Image (cartoon, helix red, strand yellow):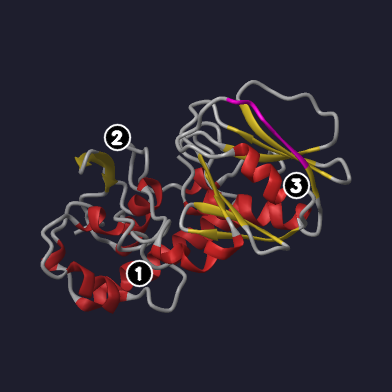
Amino acid sequence: MPELPEVEVTCQGLRKHLLGRTVENIWYSGLPLRTVFDIDRIRDDLEQKKLVAVSRRAKYLQLHFDHEALLVIHLGMTGNLGIFEQDTPRKKHDHLEWRFADGTLLRFNDSRRFGSITHVPAETVASLEKTLYRTTGPEPFSEIFNGAYLQRLARNRTVAVKQLIMTNQVVAGVGNIYANESLFRAGIRPARRIATISPSRWQGLATCIREVLSEAIACGGSTISDFVNASRETGYFQVNFRVYGRQGQPCTVCRTTIEKQMIGGRASYYCPVCQK
C-alpha cells in the first residue's frame, strides 16, 4: 500500500504538471471502487473547471478546483495516478480518466479496486476535518507532532510502540515500512511497551519519523511491488532499508542478524542489539 511518502511524491508530480489546466471531460470504467461515488455529479461539478492546487492529507490526495470544490483520492492497496499524453491507449485496470483542455490525461489505475474517490462540494470543504478526517491525527511534519505529544497520547495505553505510531488517530500516514525504519533509527524495539519509554526517547522517535519520511520523499518513495509516481517512475528508498524486509540479514550497524516478529498482525523487523 502506498504510504505517506508515496502519496506525497504523487502529489508533487501532479502539482508540477497539472496546475492551471482545465478539465474537459471525465471518463469512468463503471467498475466499483472501495467507496460509492456519483460520477454524474462529479462530471457536472468538475468538468470545465480549472485545477488550482494539489495537496495531501495523511494518505489522501486532494485536487482543488477554482470553484473551491475538491476531489479526494485514496490510492488503496495498488492504486496510482499517472499523467499521459493525449491519445495514449488505456490499460487494463484504468478506472478514471480526466482529460484536460490541452489533451493531457490523468488516469487512476487500480488492479484491486481498493482505492476511493470522494467528491467534496465547495460548501462542505470547511468541514472535512470533522467528517472525512475526523479520525485522522496530526501530520508528522506539523508543529504539534513531537516527543511530548507522543508521550501524552501514550498515557493509559498498553500497546507496543509500533502499534501506537501506526495508529492513524495518533499520527497521520505512518505505515508499516516507515514505522519499522523509524524505530530502528531511534533504537527502540517495535514491541517495546510504551510505558517504559522516556521523554527523551519519545522526542528522538518523533525526530526519526520525520527524518525517515523526508528521506523517503526525496528518494521518490519506495517501490516494493508496483508503485510508480505520476511520471511512471519508480522510487528507490527501498535500497536504503535498514530493517524492513531484511529478516535473516546482518544489521547495517552491528552485523547482528535482523529478526522478524508479528505485532498487531503486521510484520515487524528489528535488530536485537541496536534496538532496546
Q: Amino acid at mark 2?
A: Gly
Residue 165 appears in the figure: yes
Find residue 113 and report its horizontal and vertical position in percent.
Answer: 50, 30
Q: Amino acid at mark 1?
A: Ala
Q: Please state if 220 lies on the left or on the right of 243 as rendered.
A: right
**Residue located beneath label 1 in the image:** 206
Give me the C-alpha separation between circle 1 and circle 3: 42 Å
In the image, farthest residue toward the top: 92
- The residue lying at 39 percent from left, 71 percent from top is 207
Q: Amino acid at mark 3?
A: Glu
Residue 271 covered by magenta stretch: no
Q: Which residues are magenta?
A: 25-30
- Residue sitting nearer the eye, 91 or 6: 91
**Residue located beneath label 3 in the image:** 47
* Of the image marks 2 and 3, the number of the one nearer the N terminus: 3
- Label total for image: 3
- The residue lying at 35 percent from left, 46 percent from top is 176
Find residue 20 and report its horizontal and vertical position in percent.
Answer: 80, 59
Count residues near mark 2 (Cα–Cα under 10 Å), then give few for <14, some for 14-19, many for 20+.
Answer: few
**Mark seen at residue 248:** 2
* Of the image marks 2 and 1, the number of the one nearer the N terminus: 1
Screen quadrant of the C terminus: bottom left
